[in-house]
Amino acid sequence: MPKRPLSLREWLDTSGVRPAYLAERVGVSVATVYRWRAGARVVQLAHAVALVEVSRGLVSLSTLERAA
């Protein structure tokens, strides 16, 4: 496990998880995942919790909050 939580961008770039898979698991469009990754859209709390779960804690609520 990394020493610090990863940003969503870092996790997507290093995990091999595809944005389409993440979108399906979280319940949003692929375009929304790309907007989150770019920092162009704020992740709503329910989706942020789902992202933490899907990433098995590698992405944290604090990194998602800082990206906002």
Image (cartoon, helix red, strand yellow):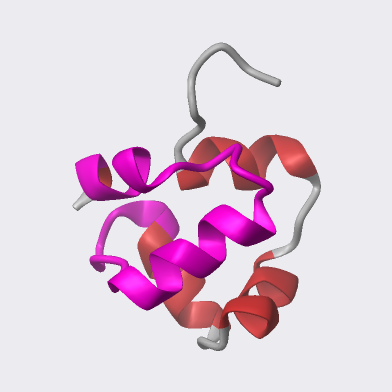
Say if the magenta span includes residue 57: yes
Residue at the spot 52% in from the left edge and 87% down from the top edge: 29
Q: Quadrant of the N terminus?
A: top right
Residue at the spot 38% in from the left edge and 76% down from the top edge: 46
Instruction: Give coordinates of residue 51: x percent, y percent.
Output: 54, 61
Q: Main secondary structure of the magenta part?
A: helix
Say if the magenta span includes residue 61: yes
Q: Is residue 17 shown above or below 16?
A: below
The residue positioned farthest toward the top in the image shown: 3
Residue at the spot 25% in from the left edge and 68% down from the top edge: 41
Residue at the spot 76% in from the left edge and 55% down from the top edge: 17
> Image check: 12 left or right of 67?
right
Instruction: Give coordinates of residue 6: x percent, y percent.
Output: 51, 32
The residue positioned farthest toward the right in the image shown: 16
Judging depth in this view, the residue of 35 and 5 nearest the camera is 5
> Which contiguous range is marked in magenta?
37-66
Instruction: Give coordinates of residue 15: x percent, y percent.
Output: 75, 41
